Amino acid sequence: MKKMGQLYEGKAKKVYATDEKGVYIVSYKDDATALNGLKKGSITGKGAINNRISNHLMAMLEEQNIPTHLVQELNDRETAVKAVTIVPLEVIVRNIAAGSLAKRLGLEEGLKLASTVLEFSYKRDDLGDPLVNEYHIKALALASEDDLRQIKEYSLQINTILGDYLLPLGIELVDFKLEFGKTDDGTIILADEISPDTCRFWDVKTHEKLDKDRFRRDLGGVEDAYKEVLFRLMGGL
Ligand code: UDP
């Protein structure tokens, strides 16, 4: 497979065309942003770590019958993925109150939610990815009713599978963000990434943060936290 021209550059990844039909290459960057792009930085080695973490978790989800964009890890920071059109929604799944939910609803961070919360944001950087509900999604045709039903079903399944997978590794799945895409034949699949950039991972025992909150909140030890997640996924404890 040959890498062709760059199609897109986002905050954490670049996407390239390839000479193979229906296949793109994503390249993970070390760049990190937070607070809707106001806070910028770089985390040494992040691209390579997230590439491996995301591929590992997507391969695990595939085994549990969740269709994902993963085709093949190519090298340290590059992966071949199925070409999709991204549904312009960020799906947020929450098990424990943290971040913007804790702030918005006046909840103490760490409060276990009585049931899983699903939220949607409209993917619009210029608007700061505003929260939308299912009426907005329908009214603005951001996703069809069938696609949204499928996206919700996969998101809740992923929450269960991922949470059950991480717990024995000493990682609590607090919340996370998913993005879905549509292939040429209209199939909805999981796209983007699953990594400490897009999830809140807390150590089960110490509640230490093993995710991007270390960067967002200037807690230090960002790279070590990402490495720790990869280490545990690779079988270390
Ligand atoms: N998240 C993300 N990208 C975003 C916004 C949120 O990956 O643009 C993830 C974030 O890492 C966390 C979850 O979604 O795991 C919920 O984030 P929240 O709404 O609390 O926003 P934040 O506090 O990160 O601004």
Image: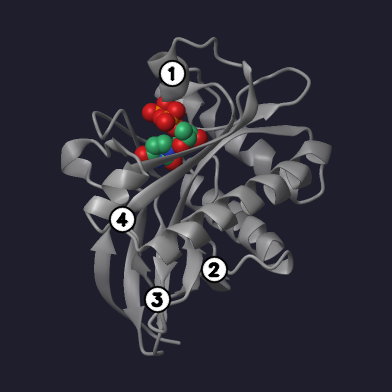
Which residue is labeled 3 in the image?
83
The amino acid on which the numbered mark 1 sits, given as a three-letter code, is Asp
Q: Position of residue 186 (x, y in %)?
A: 41, 78
Q: Nearer the viewer, residue 51 or 136?
A: 136
Mark 1, residue position: 218
The kind of secondary structure element at disc 3 is loop
In the image, residue 211 above or below residue 137: above
Q: Is residue 77 visible?
A: no
Quadrant for the N terminus, please. Answer: bottom left
* Residue 29 shown left or right of residue 48 in the figure: left
Q: Nearer the viewer, mark 4 or mark 1?
A: 4
Upstream in the sequence, badge 1 or badge 2?
A: 2
Residue under the point 22% across and 46% down: 124
In the image, the residue with mark 4 has its CB under 8 Å from the nearest atom of ligand 1 = no
Q: Position of residue 33 (x, y in %)?
A: 33, 36
Q: Check disc 2 and report the residue beneath it.
A: 75
